[in-house]
Image: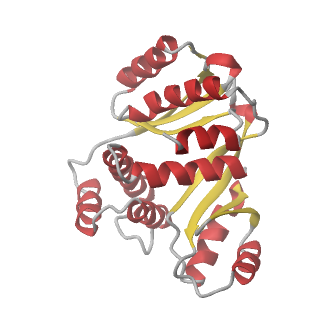
Amino acid sequence: MAGHSKWANIKHRKGAQDKKRAKEFTRAIKEITVAVKEGNSADPETNPTLRNAISNAKGVNMPKDTIERSIKKASGADADSYELVTFEGYGPHGIAIFVECTTDNTNRTVASIRSIFSKNGGSLGTNGSLEFLFDRKGVFTIDTTDIELSTEELELELIDGGALDVDKDDELLTVYTEFVDFGKMSTRLEELNIEPKNAEIQRIPLNTIELPVDQGQQIFKLIDKFEEDDDVQNVYHTLEITEVLIDSFEDE
């Protein structure tokens, strides 16, 4: 999991400086809207899903007033109505790809996702055909810069909160939990007065495929096309993220 977490952290740092910032804001607003609707509450104190969505919005540096406006709009009668939909398929070179979307027009989203697959050497499969290739885990990204605990002390606290694995990349920690321990870890971090930069349920590949750098870059170009779509929230895949592949992007 270390490669995936390191790549996510690189994307976070690169994305903060380019057009992906706007997409991060769109994703965060949709997450807030869904959280308010599903939790039947605009109060983060009584709606833990909303509390988590707000934390993620802060993690991408969304302004406080934008967050507040999003919550207010989501709780109003004219709030957008989103549906969560998923798509499964294969990209080039046998790489499985799982796409999660939040949409207000399913027909539009289906057409868009199918087009991205077909125009980039992939194929859209049937729902459920690839789910067995991924395991759902809680994933928390923590900036340790201002945490007074030592790394060892923090890791012990995280283990008490249900941590299965902890990856360190400079000042960032990526913490993995079982799906059922997501809430337990959220509570433990609150007790430690630690607000994660990001906290979500992710689909972690059970097995990965290592490709040559040029083919790996081809897969990431396909993933970027998915992530540029306004309806796409998350993209998961079975590509092995090697140090050589990561270095090829850091050199760009």
Residue at the spot x=54%, y=83% of the render? 193
| Residue 44, quarter of picture | bottom left
Please, is residue 210 above or below residue 42 in the view? above
Residue at the spot x=64%, y=37% of the render? 245
| Residue 112, quarter of picture | top left
* Residue 1 x, y percent position in the rendering: 72, 50
Q: Residue furthest front?
A: 251
Q: Residue furthest bottom?
A: 148
* Residue 77 x, y percent position in the rendering: 22, 51
Q: How many marks?
A: 0
Is residue 127 visible in the rendered image? The answer is no
Tell whether 162 sits left or right of 183.
Answer: right
Residue at the spot x=51%, y=17% of the render? 117
- In depth, the one of 177 and 85 nearer the eye is 177
- In depth, the one of 82 and 60 nearer the eye is 60
* Residue 159 x, y percent position in the rendering: 76, 73
| Residue 90, quarter of picture | top right
Please, is residue 78 above or below residue 70 in the view? above
* Residue 195 x, y percent position in the rendering: 50, 74
Is residue 63 visible in the rendered image? The answer is yes
Please, is residue 188 above or below residue 94 in the view? below
Tell whether 128 sits left or right of 120.
Answer: right
State how the image is colored. Answer: secondary structure
Tell whether 129 sits left or right of 56.
Answer: right
Residue at the spot x=59%, y=88% of the render? 148
